[in-house]
Amino acid sequence: MADETIFRIKERIRQEMRDLLGMTMADGGSIDRQALPAQIDGVAHEVCADFGISDENWIGYIIKSTIDDFIGLGPLQPLQDDPKVAEIFIDPVGVEPNGTFITPVARAEVDGQIVDCPGIDLVSHDEVGRLIGRIAEEANRRCDDSFPEMDATLADGSRVHAAHPKVSPNGWSLNIRKFSKDKLTAEDLLERGAMSEPMYMFLKSAVKARANFIISGGTGSGKTTMLNALSAFIGYNERVVTIEDTRELQLKQRIVIPRVACPPNSEGKGEFTMHELLVGALRERPDRIVVGECRDDETYEMLQAMQTGHDGSLTTIHANDCAGAFTRIENMILKSQGNMTMEAIRRQIGAAIDVVVQVKRWRGGYRRIESITAVEGFSDGNVTRNELFHWEGSPENGRHVATGYQPARLKEKILDADAEYDPRWFEGGVW
């Protein structure tokens, strides 16, 4: 069947459905989701009959794509349904000389590579705007002249960022980072070469010994995946409070108390920040605190928690290397605690943090641990830290190696907790 015919059929079904439901082009939040498929089925069969279409395979395709237009992600739903796709990008292309927007381009991350998706039929720039409007309405957000950028969460947990043409001059922009129901375990990461066996053994013992962890990395490097993997080493009966801005953590312990920050609603009210959630969590006497990402005032509270009976806490931070992670922590604390000296800040960092795991996404889509660093304290005005493991060689053909340094403070913690400690982990060699 010709694309033009399919387009005409779908447009007529959409219009008849809007007439049936009393909808405008931007509506969608008040749809009866349970009744809609049957309603579309009836209208689609009538419209297809008018066009002389009787093939049930074609009719089924038209019905599904129409349902996706109303309660799914429209033409993007096949990408959302594809388990190989990790992230979806709708990139604005530009503006014609007459002032009309060029139809955006769909791209996706598949196996670590960004690829074009020519089979995704984005009819128009306005269609992308309508889709963003429906996502915003269902998430109780706005993306318009007053709120030109939007962060939201889909029903399945996927994270959405959208930009209005007010701040995106080439047209609507949309990014969907999909929520994976099957989280990679530390064993999976070991098998995939994201860490070596000595690194795995060390990390397992350090988490069990209640070491405080910072997982650092750039965008898309696998910070949250690593945080989920390491959290599995927390004792099954420990009471864990998780704090996130978008719910992504999937802990397996018996008692997990999730807390999710609330951005302002469409009226600019109702905000509840990560900082406020963390302050509240300290009053709940958790055995562990796991924070999805420290990026603002909550950083200082996280360090305080690590030093005041909540050891064994884990969090992530956005930084391209280990040194950058410490600089970023210093800057965030300085921003929220302007009266603190840099020496006092560094003393707190040296006392609170035990391990920094630096993760990286290399060209070719490889995601693995780049280095593991032990923090030993504070000396001569600086945080004392020593690298334990790092990646050596090219992204494709390198390997993880131990530096030979034995982490004194961590060794003591691990042995005090009766967790496994083997000096050979840090000596290199073949395991």
Image (tube, helix red, strand yellow):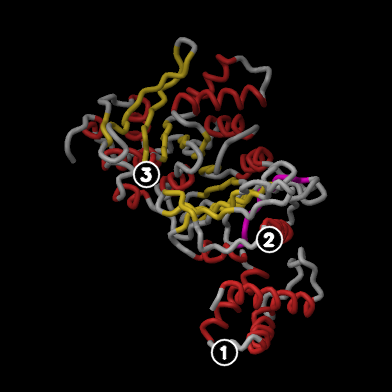
| Residue 392 visible here | yes
Q: Residue at point 31% right, 33% down?
A: 391
Which segment is the magenta one?
147-155
**The N terminus - image quarter:** bottom right
Q: Which residue is mark 1?
A: 54
Q: CA distance from mark 3 to mark 1?
A: 46 Å
Quick one: label 3 or label 1, which is nearer the N terminus? 1
* Residue 135 appears left or right of 409: right
Q: Where residue 279 appears, x then y in whole percent? A: 66, 38
Q: Earlier in the sequence, mark 2 or mark 1?
A: 1
| Magenta span includes 153 | yes
Disc 3 residue type? Gly
Q: Looking at the figure, which quarter contains the C terminus?
A: top left
Q: Is residue 290 left or right of residue 93?
A: left
Comes first in the chain, label 2 or label 3:
2
* Residue reaching furthest to the left: 430
Left of 1 or right of it: where is 17?
Answer: right
* Residue where numbered disc 2 is placed: 127
- Label 3 close to label 1 by CB (< 8 Å): no
294 vs 347: above or below: below
Amino acid type of the residue tagged 1 in the rendering = Ser
Instruction: Identify the secondary structure beneath mark 2.
Output: helix
Q: Give the percent coordinates (x, y) of residue 228.
A: 46, 49
Residue at 75% x, 47% y is 264
The residue labelled by disc 3 is: 364
Q: Nearer the viewer, mark 3 or mark 1?
A: 1
Relative to the observer, which residue lies in front, 165 or 85? 165
| Amino acid tagged 2 | Glu
